[in-house]
Amino acid sequence: MNTTDIDVLRVFCAGDGRYGNRLGVVRDGRGYPDEAVRQALAKELGFSETVFVDDPERGVVDIYTPGVRLPFAGHPLVGAAWLLDLEVVNPPVGEVWVRGDGEFTWIEARAEWAPPWPLEQFGSAAEVEALEVPEPGVGVPPGRSPGGRVYAWAWEDEAAGRVRARAFPGRGDGIDEDEATGAAALLLTAELGRALNITQGRGSQLLTAPGPDGIVELGGRVRIENTRVV
């Protein structure tokens, strides 16, 4: 039986190295040659996303949630770029440039590449922290953002660009709450038109900055948790 090494990363960690969204990276995608077997592995692993590396030199990658294939996602690209030490990463949407800045890894992306996330603003960080995980299709709270999928956010310090956020995918695939959601951070940055310092989930940190021609930079820390064999 063939075996595959999978690196498990935590992307968008806090300053002390804790938290971050877990990511599975299959460095050699050749062992999973079609969408069906890749989707099956992503479901088995149960991470919010799993990345299959098809060309490590050119950074060609393929991204899956436990239930669907994605043309673009933020934390998988930041994580894969850090792990493979890439200057460019190539998901299905096209070329994404990467830069390192001390402990942070940054990608350049366009908000229109991100999957749709309803952005629901609340009056305070405490309101966001108090939210219960919604039932799929219900919304947060019931009656707002119907469909279950929502990125709930509030200002912690508007002058400083500090945001408190939580993300509820509402897909019914076992991921009830996303610990750190780069795609939603891109959408919020594009809507507000300013740099943001986002604390999401239990304490993950995402940094963003709008750039020229519709580009948004998205950055964070990455740590390797373990390597497993499947």
Image (cartoon, helix red, strand yellow):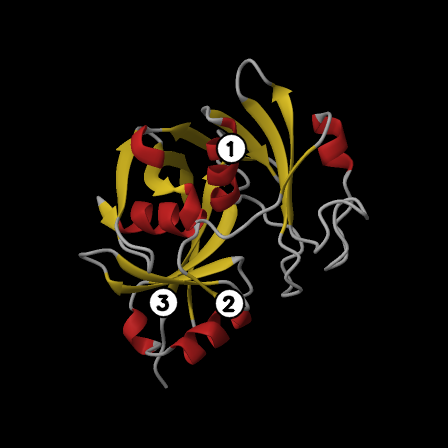
The amino acid at mark 2 is Val
Find the residue positioned furthest to the bottom.
1
Residue 38, position as x, y percentages in the image:
42, 73
The amino acid at mark 3 is Asp
Residue 87 seen from this side: yes
Instruction: Give the mark, 3 or 1, whose residue is nearer the N terminus.
Output: 3
Residue 206, position as x, y percentages in the image:
48, 34
Q: Which residue is mark 2?
A: 68
Q: Secondary structure at mark 3?
A: strand
How many discs appear?
3
Front: mark 3 or 2: 2
Q: Secondary structure at mark 2?
A: loop
Image vertical order of residue 195 relative to residue 142, above or below: above
Instruction: Give the mark, 2 or 1, whose residue is nearer the N terminus.
Output: 2
Find the residue positioned furthest to the left.
57
Q: Which residue is mark 1?
A: 191
Q: Identify which residue is drawn at 52% across, 47% down.
A: 21
Front: mark 3 or 1: 1
Q: Which residue is mark 3?
A: 5
Q: Identify which residue is drawn at 28% across, 54% down.
A: 94
Classify residue 228 as left or right of residue 178.
left
Q: CA distance from mark 3 to mark 2?
A: 22 Å
Q: Quadrant of residue 228?
A: bottom left
Find the residue positioned furthest to the front.
213
Front: mark 2 or 1: 1
Q: Identify which residue is drawn at 32% across, 77% down.
A: 31
Instruction: Give the mark, 3 or 2, whose residue is nearer the N terminus.
Output: 3
Image vertical order of residue 4 relative to residue 92, above or below: below
Residue 173, position as x, y percentages in the image:
63, 65
Between 80 and 188, which is closer to the camera in this rendering? 188
Q: Which mark is residue 67?
A: none
